[in-house]
Image: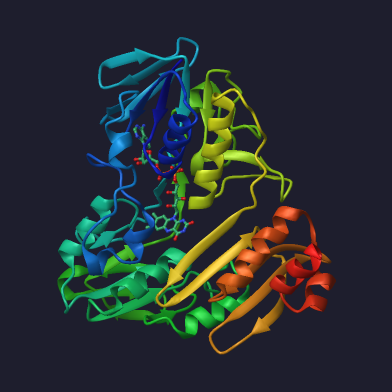
Amino acid sequence: MRIAIIGAGQATATLLQTLIRGEFAGTLTVFHDEGPRPVQRPPLSKTFFKTKTADWLVPDDLMQHPQIRWIHRTVTAIDPDAGHVIWDDEHDSFDHIVLATGTRSLKPTIEGASQDTCHTLRTLADAEAILKRITPETQVVIQGSGFLAFEIAHALATTVASVSLLLKTDRAMPQVSEVIATALMEDCPATCYPDTQIEYIQPEMAKLHTSKGPLACDLIISAIGSVPNAELGAPWGLTDQYGIAVDATMQTAHPRVSAMGEVASFPNPHTHRTQRIESIAQANDTAQVLAARLLGNPQPFQATPWFWSDQGAHKLQIAGLATRDDQSTVITHGDNTRVVARHQGEQVTAIEALNQAREFMAARRLFEQGPMNLSDLMQAGSAFSLLQSSRS
Ligand SMILES: Cc1cc2nc3c(=O)[nH]c(=O)nc-3n(C[C@H](O)[C@H](O)[C@H](O)COP(=O)(O)OP(=O)(O)OC[C@H]3O[C@@H](n4cnc5c(N)ncnc54)[C@H](O)[C@@H]3O)c2cc1C
């Protein structure tokens, strides 16, 4: 079997590893367009500005594996009926095509901004471009309210003169409960400006005009979200409103095409909704589901969703998946620690653990055992105690 994989991110790294370990008998051709060798994304917003080094995503043995061919080109089209993958003015034929194209950063249009003054952070090239522009005198403004914006604020705080963070609304990190978001906001080294919109920039005066007045600014980093790279599937009717639509085994509507990672929109068994999720765990779990099918052992997606973010010295870990409207109940609250249950009525949808790795691990195991009840969790006093009692 000849398989083409388009994109060489986290999902592809896991797919390759799992297929080779599973003694896949065919050939794997990977098309990638992000520098000569794929790198891990999470360190780019956490440690890169200090270490100035990136971590390889794919180990040497896979880069040189005789079954894997690497083609450093952007794929411009696919023809699933013919099995064709098309790039530049070349094409090749495959038995199966995997779309693992991920997402790209949403780029705002800011009056007065040039490529030098306005940046996003997704790739190693993006991180290197920011690094080139910063000095101890640089005044950085970050636009965004999510984990990434806050991670970048922590990462740059000791390297530049000032970091300002412009939040779209008065709520930081809307993905988590207010209790956790407030704790993280209090320890954020940036000056935060809630409910603040950018109007225009005057780079020659190092001034950014916002809805709340002018701000000193040499450099803007926008972390305002991303859009799926789903264009290759669109002409073939393989997309939905979120990305490339797949079933629980990562199969699209075309028998020759699969999708995985954060471009894949799939029926989530935990939320009973069609969703596209951006996380390392999701990239790994969808890749493993696809690998199992390609190895002849199809299994539907069942993994418990989980996520982590390093906010300076704080480690946030989330097991499960809450919607923004889910209720929040604090389970434990220490000096530096919090555990919060997110729930819809009695049904626990996620557990958020701040600097509580043991609670997070216990919560993940509980989710793997099936639905969790809020009263049981409250009675036990912690996810760890509930896990222990469920075992005895
Ligand atoms: C700075 C940063 C920090 C992050 N930190 C965390 C974290 O702490 N925790 C966490 O859980 N998640 C984190 N994430 C999210 C996580 O990295 C992603 O969810 C994950 O990498 C997605 O993997 P993927 O393989 O689906 O896509 P990607 O890793 O985006 O890979 C897709 C690849 O496909 C390539 N491609 C697209 N179109 C084509 C084409 N036509 N031809 C050839 N190649 C193409 C793209 O250029 C890209 O290289 C972070 C993301 C970023 C950007």
Measuring from the top left, give residue 295's x and y in whole percent: 55, 25
As drawn, which residue projects farthest toward the front? 392
Residue 265 in which image quadrant: top right
- Asked if residue 243 lies left or right of residue 363, the reply is left
**Depicted 308 relative to depicted 212: above or below:** above
Q: Residue at x 70, y 79 (%)?
A: 330
Measuring from the top left, give residue 363's x and y in whole percent: 67, 65
**Depicted 149 relative to depicted 40: above or below:** below
Nearer to me, 270 or 239: 270
Count up the numbered dots: 0
Q: Residue at x 36, y 53 (%)?
A: 41
Q: Residue at x 70, y 46 (%)?
A: 273
As drawn, which residue projects farthest toward the top? 82
**Depicted 25 relative to depicted 374: above or below:** above
Nearer to me, 137 or 348: 348
**Depicted 332 relative to depicted 301: above or below:** below
Indicate the quadrant containing the C terminus: top left, top right, bottom left or bottom right. Answer: bottom right
Let me know if residue 30 appears in the view. yes
Nearer to me, 185 or 387: 387
Residue 197 in which image quadrant: bottom left
